[in-house]
Image: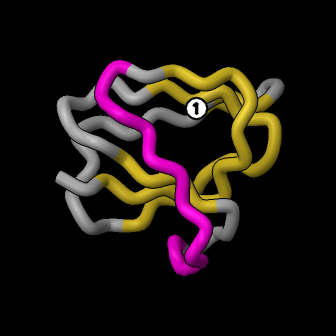
Amino acid sequence: MENGSNFQQVRDPQGGQCYPGLGADTAIANRTGGTILLFPDGNCRTRILNPLGPGEFRPDENVGSFLALD
């Protein structure tokens, strides 16, 4: 994930664990073999979720947190 000068990389995210995001206007790439869910809130609890499949890249997302499914 990248947001301006902020950069965050999570290697081998654990399935079912919530990770913090970088907020609005975040570029994100899923370089895993599984789907991750993007959430606008910081604790993966909202009903608004946005799946990002393996190999997908999005240049402008609101990533408050994310959760790896597998």
| Amino acid marked by disc 1 | Met
Residue at 25% from the left image edge and 30% from the top image edge: 32
Left or right: 9 with respect to 36? right
Whether 47 is among the magenta residues is yes
Left or right: 36 with respect to 32? right
Q: Nearer the viewer, residue 28 or 3?
A: 28
Residue at 39% from the left image edge and 40% from the top image edge: 10
Q: Which residue is mark 1?
A: 1
Task: Please provide percent x and percent y for residue 70.
Answer: 17, 52
Q: Which of the 4 image quadrants contains residue 33?
A: top left
Left or right: 23 with respect to 66? right
Indicate the colouring scheme. secondary structure
Q: Secondary structure at mark 1?
A: loop
Q: Which of the 4 image quadrants contains residue 8?
A: top right
Task: Please provide percent x and percent y for residue 17.
Answer: 32, 66
The relative height of residue 31 versus residue 47 in the rendered view (above or below) is above
Left or right: 10 with respect to 40? left
The relative height of residue 63 versus residue 58 in the rendered view (above or below) is below
Quadrant holding the N terminus? top right
Residue at 70% from the left image edge and 38% from the top image edge: 61
Q: Nearer the viewer, residue 13 or 59?
A: 59
Q: What secondary structure characterizes most of the magenta part? A: loop
Q: Which of the 4 image quadrants contains residue 7?
A: top right
Q: Which residues are magenta?
A: 44-55
The total of numbered circles placed on residues is: 1
Task: Please provide percent x and percent y for residue 42.
Answer: 64, 69
Residue at 30% from the left image edge and 28% from the top image edge: 54
Whether 48 is among the magenta residues is yes
Task: Please provide percent x and percent y for residue 3.
Answer: 75, 31
The relative height of residue 56 versus residue 44 in the rendered view (above or below) is above
The relative height of residue 3 versus residue 57 in the rendered view (above or below) is below
